[in-house]
Image: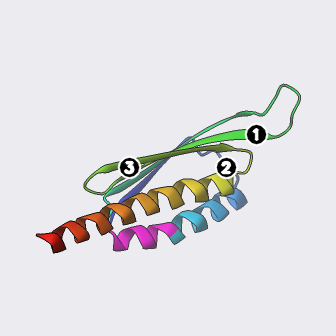
Amino acid sequence: MGKILLSGFKLEKAERSILNNIIRSYKTKLERLGFEELRLDLRQRPHSKHAKRTLYKLKGQLIAGKKFSSKEEGLNLYLITDKVLEKLLHEIEHKTRIIRIRRRRI
């Protein structure tokens, strides 16, 4: 069972709950593929000087025998979190598929 490290997430309780649900859904998928560690690093800043909206930059790193990384930037934290985790999931699935194909050829 891998561990998940979150950094820079200063959210209200309701936001944290939604984000935890997104992460939990990907965690079960990643556990089947044998991940060791998932790191999500969030940076927040105002979208512009006068805007009330926040621009989020999220960097994800996944360690599963090899290090995978993904970055996204946007105004919707939930959407970019989903995109980062989806990219990481696809990368590790691709890696495991390639390894299986190579083993069959030998």
What's under tag 3, amino acid-wise? Phe
Magenta stretch bounds: 26-34
Q: Are marks 2 and 3 in contact (CB under 8 Å)?
A: no
Alpha carbons under labels 2 and 3: distance apart: 26 Å
Q: In the rendered image, which residue does mark 2 sit on?
A: 11
**Mark 1, residue position:** 54
Q: Are there few (<14), some (14-19), or many (20+) residues within 10 Å of tag 1?
A: some
Q: Can you give x and y, in whole percent of width and height, for residue 67 in the image? A: 33, 48
Does the stretch in magenta take in 30? yes
Amino acid type, label 1: Thr
Residue at the disc numbered 3: 68
Is 48 located above or below residue 99 in the figure?
above
Q: Position of residue 102 (x, y in %)?
A: 20, 66
Category of crowding for the residue at label 3, using alpha-carbon neighbours closer than 10 angstroms: few (below 14), some (14–19), many (at least 20): some
Q: Secondary structure at mark 3?
A: strand
Label 1 secondary element: strand
